Amino acid sequence: MNRLARWLGRYLDSPLKSYKAVSTHPPGLLSSILNPGDVLLVEGDTRISVAIKYLTQSTWSHAAIYVGNVFQESGEEAAVLIEADIEEGVIIVPLSKYEKMHTRICRPKNLSGSDNKKLIDFVVERIGHQYDMKNIIDLVRYLLPTPPVPVSWRRRMIALGSGDPTRAICSTLIAQAFQSICYPILPEIEKHEGEGARNIEKEIMHIRHYSLFTPRDFDISPYFEIIKPSIVSGFDYKNINWSENFCSSKK
């Protein structure tokens, strides 16, 4: 079964010929914007990306976490992202791997320096862990053109997995890291009516199991700031070099 899963993993991880990479920022800009602890979401160009995007009803199929120049080697490109790869497990990769793809930066807000270090240490310690191959078996069953999966079940289809803590899936690895420092992503919120004349409502946050998180959750989380490199780097629409015909038609 494990050999079958690995074969399927190689097949599903192969790029689609029909995919056209669309980067929304100039090359090299990401490296000047990213901070350690930022989550980088990737649209993805593989067969498995199609399945994940369908099941999560999202643009994003993959997530990696930026750890900075922890693994800088002289004369080599710095490996600054940690991700869970189907074939290689939890690995470190250079930023150039995704520079030409559609990406999104999700930044945790007001993260303390000590918690940021704990977050980075958590993912670094898991380098070398295997990818959860049972997740591949679960995904391949839903690669039909119109799989009969109710919308309410799609999230849990992603979360079947083996449950083995030494096996990782891209978004669950990152979710575990943030849960280790008690930073919220999309917690279940339970409201209770307080006692007293003012009848104050109190919110109690419950941690979801890490296996239920997908790349999309970091995008829609109210606790992560969306960073757009072109805007942060000083965007001015007056500096855009429009074609002459376009500009003249608008005057």
Image (cartoon, rainbow, N blue to C red):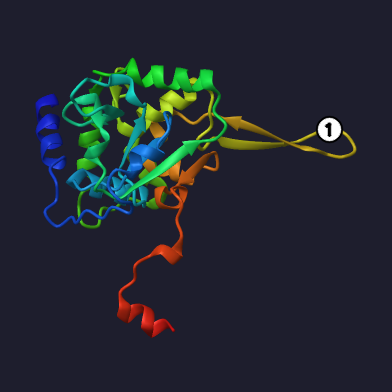
Tag 1's secondary structure?
Answer: loop
Position of residue 168 relative to residue 230, above or below, is above
Is residue 147 in sight in this rendering?
Answer: yes
Is residue 214 in sight in this rendering?
Answer: no
Q: How many marks?
A: 1
Residue at the (14%, 25%) spot, across then down: 2
Kindly give the residue lying farthest to the right in the view shown.
197
Query: Along the horizontal axis of the image, is 77 left or right of 119?
Result: left
Q: Position of residue 160 (x, y in %)?
A: 32, 33
Q: Which residue is mark 1?
A: 195
Query: Splitting the image into 4 quarters, where does residue 34 fall?
Result: top left
Q: Position of residue 89 (x, y in %)?
A: 22, 25
Residue at the (63%, 36%) spot, across then down: 190
Position of residue 230 relative to residue 107, above or below, is below
Residue at the (26%, 27%) spot, across then down: 79
Q: Position of residue 187 (x, y in %)?
A: 54, 35
Query: Along the horizontal axis of the image, is 195 left or right of 88?
Result: right
Residue at the (30%, 49%) spot, across then down: 53
Using the image as rendered, state which of residue 126 and residue 38 is in the foreground: 38
Query: Splitting the image into 4 quarters, where does residue 76 fall?
Result: top left
Q: Position of residue 225 (x, y in %)?
A: 51, 42
Identity, as a three-letter code, of the amino acid under mark 1 = Glu
Image quarter (top left, top right, bottom left or bottom right) of the C terminus:
bottom left
Image quarter (top left, top right, bottom left or bottom right) of the N terminus:
top left
